[in-house]
Amino acid sequence: MEKSIEVHNLTVSYHSKPVLWDVDFTLPKGKIIGIVGPNGSGKTTMLKTVMGLLKPDSGYTEIFGEPLDNVRERVSYVPQRESVDWDFPADVMDVVLMGRYRKNNLFKRITKEDRRIATEALEKVNLLEFAHRQISQLSGGQQQRVFIARSLAQQADIYLMDEPFVGVDAATEDAILKLLRDMKNEGKTVVIVHHDLQTANEYFDWIVLLNTRLVAAGPREEVFTKELLQEAYGGRLTVLSKLGDLIGSTEFPLREPDFKEDKPE
Amino acid sequence: MDPIFLKVVLGTMLLASSAAVVGAFSYLKQQSLVGDAIAHALLPGVVLAFILGEGRHPLYLIIGALVAGLVAHYGISFIQLRSKLKSDTATSLVLSTFFGFGIMLMSYVQRIGKGQQAGLERYLLGKAAAITMVDVYTFSGLALFLLLGVGLFYKGFQLMAFNQDFAHAIGLPVVFIRLTFTVLTVLAVTIGIQTVGVVLMAALLITPSAAARAWTKSLPSMLLIAALIAAVSAATGTLISSSIAKMPTGPWVVLVLGALGFGSLLFAPEKGLLFKRRRAREHRAKTLRENLLKLLYSQEERQEKRVKLSKAGIMQIRPMREEDVKRGLRDLKKRLWIVERRESKAPSYSLTDLGRVEGRRVVRLHRLWELYLTERLGMAADHIHPQAETMEHVITPEIESLLIKELGTPERDPHQSVIPYENK
């Protein structure tokens, strides 16, 4: 199996309270992968840690066998739609063009090629006619598609999307899904944080089932069993969450930052 | 006008504009308070620079302000990071401590009689008349540098304000961009206090953008309008304060800014309150027009021939106020949707071809919506009429074609009336 993302013994905390506990898995390339779990199970934290937005207490992640910094330009990130202020003074094209921003063109003007790529991305999500619409005037589904277009404009190999199906209408959902499958057929890898079990079964080839710790990761048929789902969704893990509260309130360090399990003392 | 004074006025305009342009990004980040905190925190730096610099060369001032501003800024970040205090608490804490320290230093300078107190007091509320030519040139140079900096970092500042996580995720040097923005903000405050002083500085950073935002939806034009608003306010404030003895500049600049800000909220297109009121009035006129057209069209439909109705005839079919009917008919005549006939004493009115198309459209929307309510929302047929009366004036052609598509070009509405289409 060719690897896309590897997560090694990852523990991440918010305000010293662990949200992810010793999570370890490897994801394949060229699949649509769902990170699935109940509310507060650490799905978004997982994605943000992989994107380097959160620092883990211990463990590390790699993409295509390398640290994120070496492969940034091959990785695209779609944050949650609600994470930005849509009243920002910008039109659809402005936002999609942000997908063309790079460290090495930060001080340069936007080129014609950038515009061409952004236009193409807008066409793919069916928003070309809205290119000059104010982003504040878009519906939820349209906003989500703008974010996806921005991500497409990055021309990456792997796409990490945080809840792209939340608050979108059925038609948009179908359109996004079709787009994801096209991307997969082009050999791209798509990783999606998703909370709806009903649809997870149809959408994903591969599933990571999270609930603070890793419940299971693997091909859909293997993971989508009654036992595993019950384990992930059947109530909070009382002992683990109590322990988490305790650690949060006393603030003792959970582990040394450079702790790696596979290295014997 | 005295050429020296003219230079002062032009200088303050440039200073205020550059401060407003940098402040625009604080406004967009919804961090309006940060500029206020930095401004107050600059005071001790400015006073120390005044003591150490003996004279008042602006370079000392800039360095002193920069150091104090950065210390304050990182103080706030440190408190946020290392304690459970929220950002507004951390900001107020640093703001008041630094400002108190600054005031204490000022009293000390006064007591030892080192500086002319007047020279220092101008940093509290601004005094454009006290600005020297050296100040004007130094700060104008700095202002141009700021504008250049914003131009250079435009993409970075824009993305950091809109979606910081994304900027981070695509590997932009967020720490560097943030540091640059902090330095620019401190410098903007440093030059801004020449006109408005530390106490009122937040107004100069934030109000121009808040006002500009009401007029435009694009970031470049927002920056431009904010700069213009700041320049006009600075010029007005400088002119007024210079013509009255002992009058500080800051309060006047801020008053003009405030007037322009509130004016923008009232008069701006789309978002302005007056515009909203006008839009409501236009919608009432449209409703009136369409009701009359619908009435004439339904009569034609019922009688299966062209009809003409007098004002009284119209009011008999649908009870309306006479002045409304009069106004509506006048409006329709002007649009050539009806013609007036004067065959008898009371004039009568009938639809033109143009008017018939419009009337048919309104009737069609009414019936389509009734059908939608019963079919899709499961409402009873005797409850839908009032709803359709409202929606027929609201539905756009875009929604109309969606409705027709979703209902499969239906023939009849729930009351078995034929739905009239244009090409049938």
Image (cartoon, coloured by chain):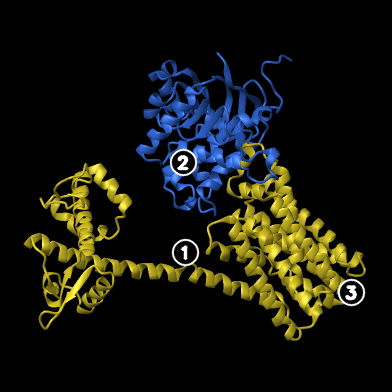
Task: Determine if marks 2 and 3 fall on one subunit.
Answer: no
- Residue found at the very far left of the displayed protein: B303
The answer to whether residue A42 is seen in the rendering is no
Determine contact: label 2, label 3, CB under 8 Å: no
Q: Which subunit holds the residue at mark 1?
A: B
User: Nearer the N terminus, badge 3 or badge 1?
Assistant: 3
Q: Which residue is mark 3?
A: B115
Residues packed near mark 1 inside 10 Å, few (<14), some (14 to 19) or many (20 plus): some
Kind of residue at disc 2: Gln
- Residue A102 at what x, y percent from top left? 66, 38
Left or right: residue A138 versus residue B20 is: left
Left or right: residue B346 versus residue B87 is: left
How far apart marks 2 and 3 lie (CA) works out to 60 Å
Query: Residue, x 14% and y 74% (percent of image)?
Result: B315
Vertical side of B96 occupied by A172: above or below: above
Quadrant in which the N terminus of chain B is drawn: bottom right
Kind of residue at disc 3: Gly
Vertical side of A104 occupied by B343: above or below: below
Query: Residue, x 64% and y 33% (percent of image)?
Result: A52
Task: Give the letter of the blue chain.
Answer: A
Vertical side of B379 occupied by B260: above or below: below
How far apart marks 2 and 1 lie (CA) works out to 25 Å
Q: Which residue is mark 1?
A: B271
Kind of residue at disc 1: Lys
- Residue B133 at what x, y percent from top left? 84, 73
Q: Nearer the viewer, mark 3 or mark 1?
A: 1
Left or right: residue B13 versus residue A142 is: right
Residues B110 and B284: in front is B284
Residues packed near mark 2 inside 10 Å, few (<14), some (14 to 19) or many (20 plus): many
Task: Give the letter of the yellow chain.
Answer: B
Q: Which residue is mark 2?
A: A144
